[in-house]
Image (cartoon, rainbow, N blue to C red):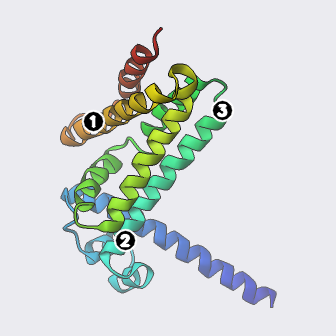
């Protein structure tokens, strides 16, 4: 019985590892192609598994694309949560959200290019569009929670919307200038200056 249980755990670990490899491979493949016009065979080859196994784990390519979006959103949520826990003041909460948006797990070349493609993909995929709405809502809600004590509930909504739009704009500019290395610190400073101007008495 113990041997069987260990064997099952081993298979589960291998399955998880292969799934993660496929998700990483689709992000890399999309970044290289500049679109979602990649095949499951291409993705499987990058992950070091057979196309049949890729289909076994994820079904269609669209399912794998959605899994990659979910993975990036999970990473973003984890970074926001980690930084918010360490925040002591409302202003630090705002900074925590901004810094999480440009964390190295997110603001790296592959992820930036993949998100640009996923934005276009959302125009034809209802699930991708839903995931983007979740991201927009989560970003603004987290910003509002820090801004409300600083500027009041009404102004917090408009400032959060402006900051969210700026964050997306910085991402878009970076995606469209792929030869420029992502400058996380400069991006954070830019958004922070806008926030400081909005909350100044």
Kindly report the distance in space between the C-alpha atoms of the residues bearing marks 1 and 3: 27 Å
Which one is in front, 15 or 193?
A: 193
The reply to whether discs 1 and 3 touch (Cβ–Cβ < 8 Å) is no
* Residue 177 point in image, percent of width and height: 19, 38
Q: Residues within 10 Å of mark 1 (few under 14, many from 20)?
A: few
Kindly report the distance in space between the C-alpha atoms of the residues bearing marks 3 and 2: 34 Å
Residue at position x 39%, y 30% from top? Answer: 158
* Residue 167 point in image, percent of width and height: 35, 35
Q: Name the residue under label 1.
A: 169
Q: Is residue 150 shown above or below 162? A: above
Q: Is residue 59 shown above or below 105? A: below
Q: How crowded is mark 3: few (under 14 residues within 10 Å), some or many (20 or more)?
A: few
Q: Mark 2 points at which residue?
A: 64
Give the SS element for disc 3.
loop
Please tell me which of labels 3 and 2 falls first in the chain.
Answer: 2
* Residue 143 point in image, percent of width and height: 49, 34
* Residue 159 point in image, percent of width and height: 40, 27
Q: Name the residue under label 3.
A: 86
Please tell me which of labels 1 and 2 falls first in the chain.
Answer: 2
For the question of whether residue 104 can be seen, the reply is: no
Single out the mark in the foreground, 1 or 2.
Answer: 1
Quarter-of-image position of residue 126: bottom left
Which one is in front, 115 or 97?
A: 97
């Amino acid at each position: 019985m113990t041997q069987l249980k260990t064997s099952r755990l081993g298979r589960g670990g291998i399955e998880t590892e292969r799934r993660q490899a496929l998700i990483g491979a689709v992000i890399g493949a999309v970044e290289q192609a500049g679109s979602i016009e990649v095949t499951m065979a291409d993705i499987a080859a990058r992950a070091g598994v057979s196309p049949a196994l890729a289909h076994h784990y994820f079904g269609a390519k669209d399912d794998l694309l959605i899994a990659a979006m979910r993975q990036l959103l999970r990473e973003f949520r984890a970074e926001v949560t980690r930084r918010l826990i360490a925040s002591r003041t409302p202003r630090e909460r705002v900074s925590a959200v901004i810094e999480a948006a440009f964390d190295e797990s997110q603001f790296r070349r592959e992820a930036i290019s993949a998100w640009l493609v996923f934005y276009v993909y959302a125009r034809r995929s209802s699930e991708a569009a839903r995931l983007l709405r979740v991201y927009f809502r989560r970003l603004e809600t987290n910003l509002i929670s820090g801004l409300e004590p600083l500027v009041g509930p009404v102004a917090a909504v408009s400032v959060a919307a402006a900051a969210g739009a700026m964050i997306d704009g910085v991402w878009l500019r970076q995606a469209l200038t792929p030869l420029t290395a992502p400058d996380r610190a400069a991006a954070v400073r830019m958004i922070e200056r806008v926030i400081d101007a909005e909350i100044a008495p």
